Image (cartoon, rainbow, N blue to C red):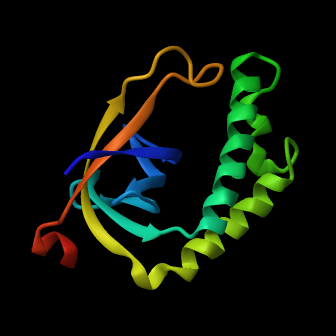
Amino acid sequence: MAYEPIHMTWDYWDGPRTGIADCDGRPHYFSCLFDPQQEEYRDLFALTPVDAETYAWAQEHWAIWQRWEAEVNAGRLTPESHPKHGRYDPRYNELEALIDAGIDRNAAQRAHRRGALRRRAVEGELFPGQWNRYEIEWSEPLDEDALR
């Protein structure tokens, strides 16, 4: 197996938890599974293929996020102006609804994979204030992992 890029991260807690990453060279929505008994995230992910239309919406959505985050890091906006609140760019929430529907359309193709995360080396800022980029190596889950 080889590491593949994580294109966008929507939720982050000690590492990317949801977003879009390649799996076998194609974009997939990923969601890291949480183990309530251990009270921590596992290395097991649910993966759903993303079609070209949904991926285009996700890229537009991510671009809005990156512009907003750059404005916050530059001190021109506050974190309370988050795009989700509709004041920064109303298209953000519209895109989120389209993305969610696109992911739901492919839910029957959802699979589980183990994922090993690592930071990808990049030179300089990716965009103002953003330095880290991640990649992930997928492997098949153990049988008992897929059942939980």
Q: Nearer the viewer, residue 31 or 124?
A: 124
Q: Give the x, y percent position of residue 29.
A: 48, 62
- Quarter of the image for residue 100 reads bottom right
Kindly identify the residue that appears in the image at 67 percent across and 58 percent down: 56
Kindly identify the residue that appears in the image at 17 percent across and 66 percent down: 141
Kindly identify the residue that appears in the image at 74 percent across and 33 percent down: 67
What is the total number of numbered labels drawn onto the structure image?
A: 0
Q: Give the x, y percent position of residue 117.
A: 29, 41
Q: Give the x, y percent position of residue 15.
A: 38, 39
Kindly identify the residue that appears in the image at 40 percent across and 36 percent down: 134
Residue 139 to residue 145: above or below:
above
Q: Give the x, y percent position of residue 124.
A: 52, 14
- Quarter of the image for residue 77 reads top right
The reply, left or right, for residue 136 in relation to residue 80 is left
Residue extending farthest to the front is 25
Q: Nearer the viewer, residue 137 or 92?
A: 137
Residue 23 to residue 46: above or below:
above
Can residue 145 be seen by looking at this rendering?
yes
Residue 116 to residue 132: above or below:
below
Residue 146 to residue 68: above or below:
below
- Quarter of the image for residue 48 reads bottom left
Can residue 35 be seen by looking at this rendering?
no
Residue extending farthest to the bottom is 108
